[in-house]
Image: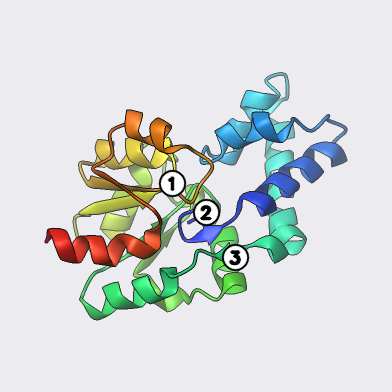
Amino acid sequence: MDNTLIHATKAHLKAYQLAFERHGLQPPSTKKLLPLFGMVSRQLVRRLFPSLTPYEVHVIVRDHDHIIQRETYTSLKAVKGVVTMLKQLKREGYRTAVVSNSRQKTILRSLKVVGISRTLFDALVGNEKALHPKPSPDEIHKAEHLVHLKASYMVGDTIYDIMAGKRAGVKVISVLTGTQSRSLLKAYKPDVILRSAADVARYLKKTI
């Protein structure tokens, strides 16, 4: 979802910085934070502050999620063209699911804020709905279970999406609307790299 369907970098960046500050921690620089985006929040926090206790990590993650939902959500914005693309996929009979390392409440709040209807998706899978977050394939497998179909494609903006898709045995479409470069994504060998998720329906029509 984040940076695939929704431009979310500013919202998450500010939310992490505020959460760290409110717990007396020096917020890491943008340069240090951005390469970790796509990682599940608890792992990101632990990577930056390895001396924190599990409870302290939990509280910071909880506060980050609250800040996203109540304060920094105003900077969320749908990636141009994704709503049209999702409607086209639905008309053509595709089943779609959001699989995200964000929590379920954050997914629902974010979609609502940017005007992407929940009804465009057959399933939503947040990180608490699967045993392990991406890069594990568990979120994809959970979506497959909910939709009663084997997934064909994983679309995402990070290397964690690529790894999850490959481990789930699906084709991977990487997009360039996130914080990771084309060269980094290419190194993890997705099946294709597109400018944005808005191009997915057009790509599928050409390849199927």
**Which amino acid, mark 2?**
Asp
First in sequence, mark 1 or 2: give its number. Answer: 2
Question: Do the CB atoms of the residues marked 1 and 2 lie less than 8 Å apart?
Answer: yes
The residue tagged 1 is 157
What secondary structure is found at the residue carrying circle 1? Answer: loop
| Label 2: how many Cα within 10 Å (few below 14, some 14–19, many 20+) | many
Q: Is residue 28 left or right of residue 124?
A: right
Displayed quadrant of residue 52: top right
What secondary structure is found at the residue carrying circle 3? Answer: strand
Q: Position of residue 6 (x, y in %)?
A: 53, 60
What whole-number distance in Å separates the C-alpha atoms at marks 2 and 3?
10 Å
Displayed quadrant of residue 60: top right
The residue tagged 3 is 77
**Which amino acid, mark 1?**
Asp
The C terminus sits in image quarter: bottom left
In this view, the residue farthest toward the top is 51
Determine whether 40 is above or below 79 in the image: above
| Label 3: how many Cα within 10 Å (few below 14, some 14–19, many 20+) | many
Q: State how many labels appear.
A: 3
Question: Do the CB atoms of the residues marked 2 and 3 lie less than 8 Å apart?
Answer: no
State how the image is colored: rainbow
The residue tagged 2 is 2
- Camera-nearest residue between 182 and 7: 182
Is residue 158 visible from the viewing direction of this image? yes
First in sequence, mark 2 or 3: give its number. Answer: 2
- Camera-nearest residue between 205 and 144: 205
Is residue 45 visible from the viewing direction of this image? no
Q: Where is residue 105 in the image (x, y as percent from the top left)?
A: 59, 61
Q: Where is residue 197 in the image (x, y as percent from the top left)?
A: 38, 59
**Which amino acid, mark 3?**
Lys
In this view, the residue farthest toward the bottom is 91
| Label 1: how many Cα within 10 Å (few below 14, some 14–19, many 20+) | many
